Amino acid sequence: MKYKRILLKLSGEALMGEKNYGIDSKRLEQYAHEIKKITDLGVEVAIVIGGGNIFRGVQAENIGIDRVQGDYMGMLATLINAMALQSALEENGMFTRLMSGIKIESVCEPFIRRRAIRHLEKGRIVIFGAGIGNPYFTTDSTASLRAIEIEAEVVLKGTRVDGVYTADPEKDKTATRYTTISFQEVYEKNLNVMDMTAFTLCQENNLPIIVFDMNKDGNLANLIRGEKVGTLIM
């Protein structure tokens, strides 16, 4: 396998599937099957999932909620998604641990770096919920930070598009996909990959990012085997 330990970043919106809100059970099941394929190959998997299908902290001020309060609400939304994903993974025979950036001992463990690494070494999938536990940080930042902390070899950002394009492919039909691109080129071309905090963390720690289409069957396993899938940023 090309990668032994990875961090998979999933968006909350992706869990909506064909719905306008909440969690689509079919999409959840699909993701569980895709993740099982790589755990069966012996890959150590950590996951960060967003909460945009339920609530986004940046929307708080638009409805009269304090931004900090809204960010904490968003963290709880990520935990709901993380618990749903945990259940789907376990239904498919995988062993998991859910770790949270804020203390909710009734449903998950607090994040402790050494314990997270030990879970991975034992073959358990570790899901990181509730961000890093502080407002003003996105789940992209969480993914970058946790990947560095657990010494992951790569951040795999699963999206609904198959990589990074010269422009938004849903709006510009002439947009072309990059196979490989440097961190510096992403900066210079102002391409929307991650927020700047998350992106800079990866760059400064020489942690590559691969943006790929998580919704296409087999993509995740092919990527782990070293096939050219999506866009590699390094």
Image (tube, rainbow, N blue to C red):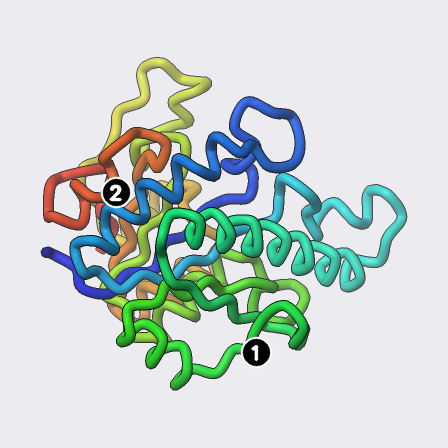
Query: In the rendered view, does 175 fall on the left or right side of 227?
Result: right
> For the N terminus, which image quadrant?
bottom left
Compared with 23, 167 (above or below) is: above
**Where's residue 194, x and y in %?**
44, 50
Residue at 65% x, 36% y is 22
Residue at the far top in the pictured view: 173
Q: Which amino acid does label 1 sit on?
A: Pro
Instruction: Identify which residue is drawn at 26% across, 24% down.
Output: 176
> How many tags in the picture?
2
Element on which disc 1 rests: strand
Residue 131: x %, y % from top left: 57, 64
Q: Which residue is at a point 31% across and 61% down the rendered structure image?
A: 45
On the rendered structure, is 15 left or right of 44? right
C-alpha span from label 2 to label 1:
28 Å
Residue located beneath label 2 in the image: 220
**In the drawing, does residue 178 fall left or right of residue 227?**
right
- Residue 191 percent coordinates (x, y): 39, 41
Say which residue appears at 66% left-offset and 31% top-offset.
Answer: 21
Kindly identify which residue carries mark 1.
110
Residue lying furthest right:
64
- Is the residue marked by circle 2 packed among few (<14), some (14-19), or many (20+) residues within 10 Å? many
Residue type for callout 2: Leu
Give percent across and percent down for residue 49: 50, 52
Quarter of the image where one finds residue 221: top left
**Crowdedness of circle 1 by 10 Å Cα count: few (<14), some, many (20+)?**
some
Q: Which mark is residue 81?
A: none
Res 130 quadrant in image: bottom right
Secondary structure at numbered mark 2: helix
